[in-house]
Image (tube, rainbow, N blue to C red):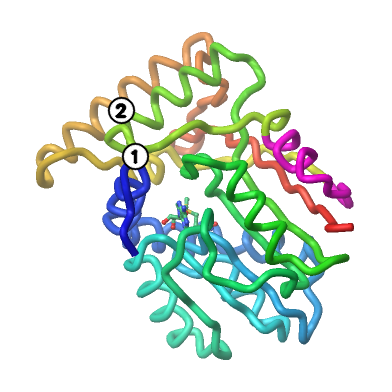
Amino acid sequence: MALTEPKAGVQRLFNRLSGPYARVVFSRLQRETQADVAWVHPRAGEKVLDLACGPGTLALELVGYGCRVYAVDLAEQMIARAQVARRRRRCPPVHFAVADVEQLPLPGDVFDLVACAFSFADFPAPVQAVAEMCRVTRRGGRRAVLEAVAPEDPAQSAELDRLERLRSAGVSAHLLSLTELTALFRQASLELLDAKVSERKRRLEDWLGAAVGEGGVPAQRRLQRHLRVKLLETARGDAAGLHIERHRGHWFFSAKVAQLLWRKP
Ligand SMILES: C[S@@+](CC[C@H](N)C(=O)[O-])C[C@H]1O[C@@H](n2cnc3c(N)ncnc32)[C@H](O)[C@@H]1O
């Protein structure tokens, strides 16, 4: 797949991050993922697509419900991790493929459920991603979106984007607010079935562990130290809306996560 920037940058970033990302997802976030997938009410036999699947986060839960699962991601290392995790967990087969969400190599009107989690900030053209999600969903099918959303306050949102860009060597695009995310799907004339927003505690060290800088391990450590200082600075006055706090010897921040379930009429 020939990619131009910034997508090639996103692919490089997630190929590098696949290891640490998979470790966090399959250890600390496993229960959360199970609850998120249960909320969608997957049914046995449904044909389901997990978009930007990462290491198989949703896909490996969905297949446990007896769904026929397809899952795509831009980063081949993420797909490789997903295949290994599927074998380790002895899950039924999943159709994994390397593909771009904004140009899916899939026929239209075929999926009963299309899910996408924690990825919209990395799509350079989110409108195109939504259009593709719509195209491949069958009439009456569901669209599930799980996303960390930015604060509605523009100054806090800009500060959060700045921190994310520092962490990802400038690759990360723009974390959408709930208003922006909802507007994207409303434009696609979908019917909203369910929506909720929750505050989820995340460990600062996990967020820092996914920092990617130019150079080897020493440069990486320097970047992590720098980011840690920057993040703790934002705690004063809550400049990025992260509600940073210390609890039992660890720093935590609060991610606001939106769960949106849509139906294609
Ligand atoms: C933060 S991870 C989320 C992974 C997974 N959905 C989860 O919930 O753990 C973002 C994922 O989006 C993928 N991604 C970013 N842009 C993409 C695109 N245009 N097409 C397909 N995957 C993409 C990345 O490779 C990465 O695996």
Q: Whole-percent x and y of residue 109?
A: 74, 70
Q: Residue at x 40, y 46 (%)?
A: 206
Q: Are marks 1 and 2 in contact (CB under 8 Å)?
A: yes
Q: Residue at x 48, y 77 (%)?
A: 96
In the image, residue 202 sits, relative to residue 2, either above or below, namely above
Residue 145, labelled with which disc?
Answer: none
Residue 227, labelled with which disc?
Answer: 2
Q: Magenta part of the protein: which range?
A: 181-194
Q: Whole-percent x and y of residue 252?
A: 49, 35
Magenta highlight on residue 183 = yes
In the image, residue 179 sits, relative to residue 106, either above or below, namely above
In the image, residue 120 sits, relative to residue 27, either above or below, namely above
The residue to which callout 1 is attached is: 208
Q: Whole-percent x and y of residue 249?
A: 42, 37
Which amino acid, mark 2? Answer: Leu
Q: Residue at x 50, y 31 (%)?
A: 174
Which amino acid, mark 1? Answer: Leu
**Which structural element holds mark 1?**
helix
In the image, residue 181 sits, relative to residue 160, either above or below, namely below
Magenta highlight on residue 114 = no
From the viewer's perspective, tell me whether residue 142 is left or right of residue 211.
right
